[in-house]
Amino acid sequence: MSDDAMEKLVSLCKRKGFIFQSSEIYGGLNGCWDYGPLGVELLRNIKEVWWKAMTYREDVEGIDASILMNQRVWEASGHVDSFTDPMVEDRKTNERFRLDQLLEENGIDVAGLSAEEMGTLLRERDIKSPKGNELSDPRQFNLMFKTFVGPLEDDSARVFLRPETAQGIFVNYLNVQAATRQKLPFGIAQIGKAFRNEINTKNFLFRTREFEQMEMQYFVAPGTQDEWFDYWRAERWKWFAQIGLPERKLSWHEHQGDELAHYARAAFDVQYEFPFGPGEIEGIHNRGDYDLSQHEAFAGKQLKYFDEEQRTKFVPYVVETSIGASRTLMACLVQAYHEEEVKGETRVVMRFHPRIAPIKAAVLPLVKRDGMPAIARQIAEDLRPYMRVLYDEGGAIGRRYRRMDEVGTPFCLTVDSDTLEDQTVTVRARDTMAQERVPIAELHAHLESRIDAWQIP
Ligand code: GAP
């Protein structure tokens, strides 16, 4: 996808009600976006596919922990000390930049370099700010948003907006285990908002300050973590086809040296080929016993698992799968955007996997007479308990098809004069524009089977 096509996609997202700038009438708020009527549906569908894949199985339970947690959680997890990015400041304008991004923009590969090594390179290469000014020495900037609970704004009341959902899982791990009587290995999954005060936000939904994560912590017996790490890498890789992201656009990136987060012993990212290059959408991490051991030490509470068969107690190891819902949604938008020439006109079509398409079918009376609107409305009503359906009677049928192509509706169901005779409708497919006649009584089963059978182009 070219930069030009990316601009068109961002504009389509606003025009059609996928994504709006947050508080736009006040000039917006950097790094924050709102999901419009179609965006929220697309996001919910992606989350639903993930939730089913991850929790509709015997060994994974779901939770929904609160965003605000006791501040000690973040001291124990290492985020207070280590959840930082190296930052430099333009000495004239006071603009701030993430050091690694600035070096990369200057053609320097920073993979595996420590903050100190990056600082040395900055000086050696005499790198200036994008406005050509001197830069400050690098310093570490903590990415957590801070606020206070209750009326007193002192240190004891300080809390952080969670920068990852994972900690809500760690602190609840024994509660869940006791409530569900799960035995190792088992996992806990959660979907929820996370917040990071990113130094530089960029690339639309890719790097934002408020976003949603879908995370799963899988608790395993020490010594088995490598095998489970491989298992979850393979599972997660396969999952992307379910939301229409093809393997050819995905790649692995293994974290090296200083790239590894403070909690990780090993980490692999799944990257999607965005217009600006490969970008991480999911991380699979071997977190060892880091988090649970830290919480044991800081909370002074035992978080050991009791193995009834072996009669032993130990702190489990953890394999984490962590995917950004908002970033994944952006990948799905990029993947879906398609332009083609049809009869001398440009057809814009969002080729979403029908499973995640915000509207599954549009029901269209060919004309507004002869009882066609009433039949079409009835068809829409009958399908609504199963899927999101839109009724549209406004304008020429060709225009109505195009409107549905642009928002990625996989099927248009047209009621015409034949319908009055034989109780069938035309089902028009978004991708091929091919049409076939289907009895009204079979529509629901017909659409469901085509949604499941859909193949990535
Ligand atoms: N619990 C582990 C963890 O949070 P991470 O690699 O920092 O790991 C996981 O984040 C995922 O969250 C990323 O792969 C990405 O999809 C998403 N993510 C992280 N920071 C983000 C941001 N600023 N904007 C949007 N998504 C973000």
Image: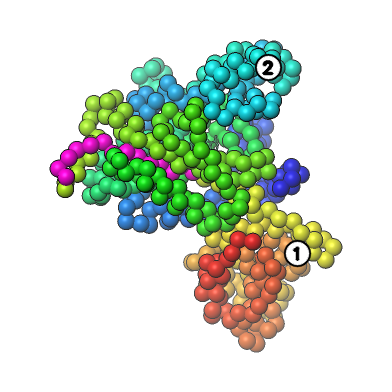
Of callouts 2 and 1, which one flags the residue occurring earlier in the amino acid sequence?
2
Q: Is residue 311 rendered magenta in the image?
A: yes
The colouring scheme, among rainbow, by chain, secondary structure or one colour, is rainbow
Amino acid, disc 2: Arg
Which residue is painted at 44% across and 23% down in the image? 82
Looking at the picture, tell me which residue is in the foreground, 332 or 443: 332
33 over 425 or under it: above or below:
above
Q: Residues within 10 Å of mark 1 (few under 14, many from 20)?
A: few
Q: Is residue 313 rendered magenta in the image?
A: yes
Amino acid, disc 1: Arg
Which residue is painted at 39% across and 16% down in the image? 154
In the image, which disc is placed on residue 399? 1
Instruction: Give the side of residue 31 with respect to residue 315, left or right.
Output: right
Which residue is painted at 30% across and 48% down in the image? 185
Secondary element at tag 1 = helix
402 over 42 or under it: above or below:
below
Q: Residue 367: horizontal and vertical position, in percent? A: 72, 74
Which residues are drawn in magenta?
310-324
Instruction: Give the side of residue 33 with respect to residue 433, left or right.
Output: left
Q: Residue 4: horizontal and vertical position, in percent? A: 76, 44
In the image, which disc is placed on residue 125? 2
Looking at the picture, tell me which residue is in the foreground, 91 or 210: 91
